[in-house]
Structures are given as structure tokens and as C-alpha cells.
Image (spheres, grey):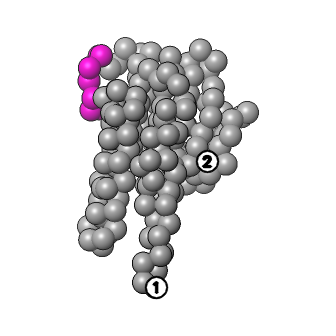
Amino acid sequence: MRTLGFDPGNKGALALYDTAAPKVIEAWALPVIIEQRSKTKKTFIDEMGLCALLRSIGEVGEVWIEDVFSSSQMGVVSAFSFGEGKGIIKGCVAGVLKLAPHYVSPATWKAAMRVTADKNQTKRMARAIFRASPLSTEGKCEAALIALYGSLRRQANCLPHGTART
């Protein structure tokens, strides 16, 4: 089965894991649009680019999205943008792949994969597991580990069909 994992955010990524290989087939940065707004540049997930990318991937058995939320340390605009990005991913997955995604909190998948919030440790772990895979960024590493986490959950029969949240 091919499992797609998403690390949301403007610097996020998605990774396709194949249990038959088993390996990460490919990992992509989330497509983004950068707009000049007065004196600052704003980055947004490109929904049309993401939909096109998902159509090009082919058959996917399940999708796992990191279940992220805004925090009290974020500003209002940042929190809105973060939520908007997650919504774009959810909509593209449902619309293009016709799948209900599964959600996993960062704490849950990181504990299961034995990594901490330390981004360098996460990159080292992903690169150690997926040695021949294209994991050049932290986002791609996290997306690959999320896809692996989801695949392992399915293989262990810990997740009945139709369950969308973990």
C-alpha cells in the first residue's frame, strides 16, 4: 500500500511511502506562492499546485496529516495562515484523492518514531531509516516519518478502516 504523509506549513512537505518496497518513493516540498504585500513577502500554500501534484502521484491507499494547531505564542495573522494551510491540504486530499485523511498529533507520531522536537534529530532519524530516499529538508524528513508511522499503524491493525482521527 502507498501511504502519503504531510507535514503542514509553508515550509512543509509531503512524502510517499510504499510498504511493498518498503521505502519512500518520493518527497516534495509543498508548492507555495510568494506574494509581495506592501513591504513584506507572504508565503501561501499553492492549492492549484498541490492538486496538480496529487493528481500526478497516482494511486494512494491512505493519507496521514500531522494534526497541528495554532498556539498562544502565534500572532493572529500567523495562526490564521497556519490554519488556512492545513485546510488547503485537507481539501486537496479529499477533492483529488477522494480519501478521508487520518490525523496524528506531533507528540504521538514523534513518540512512536522515537524522535523529539529537535529538528536535527528528526532529520538524522529519517535519513537513517530511509537511506536512499530524497530527504533533503526537515519538512520532507517529517513527512516521511509521518507516512511511515501511518503505515505501521495500519500494518499493526491498530486503526480500523474508516477511522479518521487518532
Q: Secondary structure at mark 1?
A: loop
* The residue stretch that appears in magenta: 160-166
Q: Is residue 49 above or below residue 54?
A: below
Q: Nearer the viewer, residue 103 or 34?
A: 34
Q: Is residue 3 above or below residue 79?
A: above
Q: Secondary structure at mark 2?
A: helix
Residue at 34% across, 19% down: 158
The answer to whether residue 91 is seen in the rendering is: yes
Q: Is residue 86 above or below residue 111?
A: below
Residue at 50% across, 57% down: 32
Asked which quadrant contains residue 96, the reply is top left
Q: Is residue 99 above or below residue 74?
A: above
Tags 1 and 2 touching, CB below 8 Å: no
Residue beneath disc 1: 39
Asked which quadrant contains residue 100, the reply is top left
Q: CA distance from mark 1 to mark 2?
A: 34 Å
Residue type at numbered disc 1: Lys
Q: How many C-alpha atoms fall within 10 Å of the one at disc 2: few (<14), some, or many (≥20)?
A: many
Q: Nearer the viewer, residue 63 or 88?
A: 88
Residue beneath disc 2: 123
Q: Nearer the viewer, residue 21 or 77?
A: 77
Whether 54 is among the magenta residues is no
* Mark in front: 1 vs 2: 1
- Type of secondary structure dominating the magenta stretch: loop
Which of the labelled discs sits on residue 97, or is there none? none
Q: Locate residue 119, reporting x and y percent.
A: 55, 54
Instruction: Classify residue 133 as left or right of residue 36.
Output: right
Asked which quadrant contains residue 15, the reply is top right
Q: Locate residue 10, reporting x and y percent.
A: 46, 58
Residue at 49% across, 32% down: 55
